[in-house]
Amino acid sequence: MSAVEVSEPFMNRIVTGFLSLLFLLGVPVGIRAQESPAAFVERQKTEAKEEVVRFLKSGTPRDRAWAAHLCAKFELKEFAPQLIAALNPKFGNTGWASPTPLCPDRGRTEVEENRFPEEKIQAIGNQAVLDALIRLGARPTADELRPYAKGHPNETLILLAREPVLNEAALMTFLDGDAAAFAMPVLVKSRSRMLAVKFLRESVTIRVSITAPERKNHSGMPGGVPGGVAGASISTATPCPLVNYPRIRFYKLVSPTLATLYGQKVETEEKLAWITLDFGRSYDEPWRQYQDERNVSPLPCRQLVADLMEDSGAFRDLEDFPRVVITFPWAGQKDACRRIAETCTRTRAAFLELKRKYVVKNILTQAEADAIPFKIKLEIVDARPSGSRPLPEFKCPDCPEK
């Protein structure tokens, strides 16, 4: 047989296999042979739309998940309003975390729905819809997203950040939780007036930590107690995937400076960065990453204010209020009162300068700025060794306790 010759039985097997494949795909051979790639894609989208309508009518968590999956896969952006309507606010506060069945030995064995409580199944359905809304570029309103801020905070924050001006009040609610470090840059970028006022209205806390009098060791250097940090390996496990469910994805907000440590694609949008996790996989995180991501502190006040006013050089000497921390060794009541009063004076001056800048930048009117008083709360922490004589009561006239 020459290089270009093919035996008839061999050709028959190829043709038979090809026809069998078309049969399995459920498409008539004649139509498949005549269909262009563009027509094939369009037909798939049409069929997907029909399935989405059917799934949404059912309303079960599984069908909602499949509807969301198809909308994201085929980019059916026109279904975004129907997906938002399919969310179940009754279970919005329920997250996907434990207690839920975990895969044995980090396997991928699927789990039946009946092994999960009803609220978890409903939460998974909501999660699938929120994932699709993110991938479709949807922009739900703050009212539509409010029920899911507790159970699905990361997904809610990503969606809210797409309209930071309209969703300003909703974004402000994240400043009191674990996501504060991620919500803050979004508000700063949008030049949030609410954030500017928050910096001024909060009481300034001056925390004074008084240590033992300075002593020198044999080397002539100030003495001290060395400290150390213990580490550990922390593993986070996610539940097994559910039988007959599509891929369910969850979102983990990450610090941009740490994003490259995760070894997977990092997505960014509106000053937020995140990675996606699959429902049904286990992830090991080094202790440092785990700690850093959960203890991300907001930027110092002076940096936030400078960004808010789009003035990189502003407030380089601004105290990091609303919480100012000073530490000094005990050298008598007069010395301590002097140090505290000096700190209060600097902080008050920074506060007044901040109000003036807000007016200049048209963030506040003069009347609004004048109506915000300067409030100081003084906290004294006795960090001296036990058994020391109690500290006297401080009554510095320039730094009232209330």
Image (tube, rainbow, N blue to C red):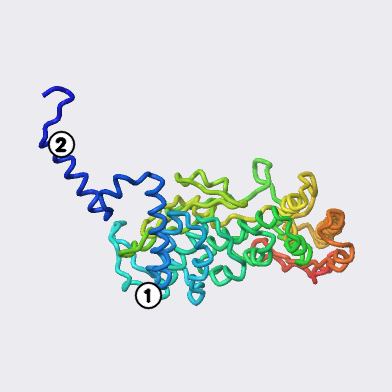
Q: Is residue 338 visible?
A: no
Specify the amino acid type for callout 1: Pro
Q: Residue at x 49, y 70 (%)?
A: 87
Label 1: how many Cα within 10 Å (few below 14, some 14–19, many 20+): few
- On the image, the x and y values in percent for residue 8 come to 11, 34
Residue 170 image label: none
Q: What residue sits right under mark 1 in the picture?
A: 117
Residue 11 image label: 2
Specify the amino acid type for callout 2: Met
Q: Indicate left or right for 348 with 133 as reference.
A: right
Q: Indicate left or right for 380 with 155 as reference.
A: right
Instruction: Work out whether 320 lies above or below 398.
Output: above
Distance from disc 1 to disc 2, alpha carbons, whole Å, reads 55 Å
- On the image, the x and y values in percent for residue 388 come to 69, 65
Q: Closer to the observer: label 1 or label 2?
A: 2
- On the image, the x and y values in percent for residue 4 come to 18, 25
Q: Residue at x 62, y 60 (%)?
A: 180
- SS of the residue under disc 1: loop
Q: Which image quadrant for residue 116?
A: bottom left
Which residue is most to the top? 2
Of residues 333 and 244, the one nearer the viewer is 244
Instruction: Work out whether 255 lies above or below 111.
Output: above
Q: How many marks?
A: 2
Of residues 288 and 214, the one nearer the viewer is 288
Q: Which image quadrant for residue 320?
A: bottom right
Quadrant location of the C terminus? Answer: bottom right
